[in-house]
Image (cartoon, rainbow, N blue to C red):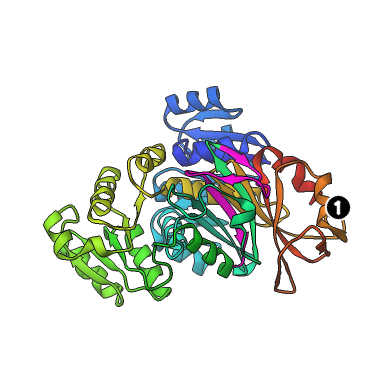
């Protein structure tokens, strides 16, 4: 495809980096230095200019574009970019927004603004956070096959019962597949004799129940399920959506917001959330409200530095897990190194969502592992697939290394894949695929 990306910030750059090897990519930005950097670092055409201007879009040959992605940090700019592109081309338009009101308007009329697909940064970040709550030690969770299958990534601590044991010893779950071990930045397809080491990240695929059971074996001391106490620090849009989504799942969270007017508004909108007006960095308040007894604290303030401070204070008070919203993607690894259990970058989450959408192709659903190291994808098997009508142990050896069949659903029934399992046309198969072979293997599936 010919893809035009407007906005060369963290989101736009990430999307461009993921697409440039397989597509013709044009990046537009008003900052000449960013454009020059993109031209130097990626195989893209960089154009310096205003992406809302017809003249700039025409310079990017918008008439020949298959897709336009508006990814600047300004919602209104992104909407205007898509509207302008739709007026002068037949390109498929994608807009990134932060304000959920724009998303609601678009959802009521999918033709609104001239936008074909809209992603909301704040809502996606909140959904990403909520999916890991209730799963001890989980770092990422994605649903497949209409919720019948889950992919989850777990961090293995030094004192975890599964640390320093083999995959064969850890695999005590009938409906679970160990798909990968992420170690020192590398992806390893595990075998029965593979030893899980402290610090590893283990990717599993299975039924939600089996994933929950494995989570308990990874971190048995953490509190799973809706009974756990969650404290949300910050009544930002992300904080609000985290609390709202938790209420929908049966939780009764607490939320701390410093601004009195915002706290009162949130209390009206969140009937099952206890909203407290206070400064979350006030140690006396935190101790008085027994925040240290919480199972999980979500730091969702507007400042990365304050979210780091809140997370460290919460950990010092005895909170089991901390999740911090980190706007600057480059800070995620640093914050996790100094004490944050899970860092969630809204920019990274929305970049992955847009990239996932552009790369679906024949796949029903795709999740990206560690941004770009691997993919978990769901396909519906047709008669031409290399998997169709064959046992898994026959077909998989004909595919490149780095592929694991994680789960199968047939007529909405879950099937645990084994070597002698015969895959039938019409089955929905969830596979783990190393990024290095994804491009080669997808056409065969």
Q: To which quarter of the image does residue 24 belong?
A: top right
Give the x, y percent position of residue 126: 41, 59
Please state, as top left, top right, bottom left or bottom right, where the N terminus lies in the image: top right
Give the x, y percent position of residue 171: 62, 58
Kindly state the secondary structure of the residue where label 1 is placed: helix
Circle 1 Cα neighbour tier, 10 Å, few/some/many (<14 / 14–19 / ≥20): some
Q: How many marks?
A: 1
Residue corresponding to mark 1:
394
The residue drawn where x is 58% and y is 34% is 26
Is 287 one of the magenta-colored residues?
Answer: no
Q: Is residue 239 visible?
A: yes
Q: Tell me where the magenta segment starts and ends, as one range.
A: 186-207
Give the x, y percent position of residue 391: 85, 58
The residue drawn where x is 76% and y is 60% is 418
Is residue 64 found left or right of 354 in the rendered image?
Answer: right
Is residue 126 found left or right of 359 in the rendered image?
Answer: left
Give the x, y percent position of residue 29: 46, 33
Q: Nearer the viewer, residue 211 or 1?
A: 211
Is residue 193 found left or right of 143 in the rendered image?
Answer: right
Is 196 one of the magenta-colored residues?
Answer: yes
The residue drawn where x is 23% and y is 62% is 291
């Amino acid at each position: 495809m010919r893809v035009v990306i407007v906005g060369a910030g963290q989101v736009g750059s990430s999307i461009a980096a993921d697409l440039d090897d397989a597509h013709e990519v044009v990046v537009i930005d008003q900052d000449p230095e960013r454009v020059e950097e993109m031209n130097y670092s990626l195989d893209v055409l960089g154009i310096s200019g205003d992406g809302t201007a017809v003249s700039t879009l025409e310079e990017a040959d918008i008439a020949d574009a298959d897709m336009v992605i508006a990814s600047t940090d300004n919602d209104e700019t992104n909407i205007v970019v898509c509207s302008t592109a739709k007026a002068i081309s037949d390109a498929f338009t994608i807009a990134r927004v932060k304000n959920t009101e724009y998303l609601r308007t678009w959802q009521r009329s999918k033709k609104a603004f001239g936008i074909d697909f809209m992603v909301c940064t704040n809502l996606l970040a909140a959904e990403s956070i909520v999916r890991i709550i209730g799963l001890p030690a989980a770092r990422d969770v994605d649903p497949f096959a209409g919720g019948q299958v889950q992919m989850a990534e777990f961090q293995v601590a030094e004192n975890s019962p599964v640390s320093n044991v083999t995959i064969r010893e850890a695999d005590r779950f009938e409906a679970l597949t160990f798909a990968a071990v992420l170690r020192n930045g590398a992806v390893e397809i595990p075998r029965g004799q593979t030893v899980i080491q402290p610090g590893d990240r283990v990717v599993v695929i299975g039924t939600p129940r089996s994933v929950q059971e494995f989570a308990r074996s990874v971190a048995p001391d953490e509190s799973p399920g809706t009974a756990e106490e969650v404290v949300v620090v910050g009544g930002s849009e992300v904080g609000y959506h985290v609390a709202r989504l938790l209420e929908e799942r049966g939780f009764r969270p607490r939320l701390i917001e410093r601004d009195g007017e915002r706290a009162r508004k949130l209390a009206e909108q969140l009937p099952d959330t206890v909203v407290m007006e206070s400064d979350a960095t006030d140690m006396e308040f935190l101790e008085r409200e027994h925040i240290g007894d919480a199972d999980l604290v979500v730091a969702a303030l507007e400042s990365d530095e304050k979210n780091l401070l809140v997370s460290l204070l919460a950990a010092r008070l005895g909170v089991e897990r901390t999740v911090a919203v980190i706007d600057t993607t480059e800070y995620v690894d640093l914050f996790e190194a100094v004490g944050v259990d899970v860092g969630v970058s809204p920019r990274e989450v929305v970049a992955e969502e847009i990239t996932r959408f552009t790369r679906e192709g024949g796949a029903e659903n795709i999740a990206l592992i560690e941004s770009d190291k691997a993919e978990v994808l769901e396909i519906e098997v047709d008669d031409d697939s290399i998997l169709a009508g064959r046992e898994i142990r026959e077909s998989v050896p004909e595919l490149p290394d780095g592929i694991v069949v994680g789960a199968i659903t047939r007529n909405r029934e879950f099937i645990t894949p084994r070597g002698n399992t015969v895959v039938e046309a019409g089955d929905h198969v969830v596979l783990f695929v190393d990024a290095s072979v994804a491009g080669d293997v997808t056409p065969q599936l």
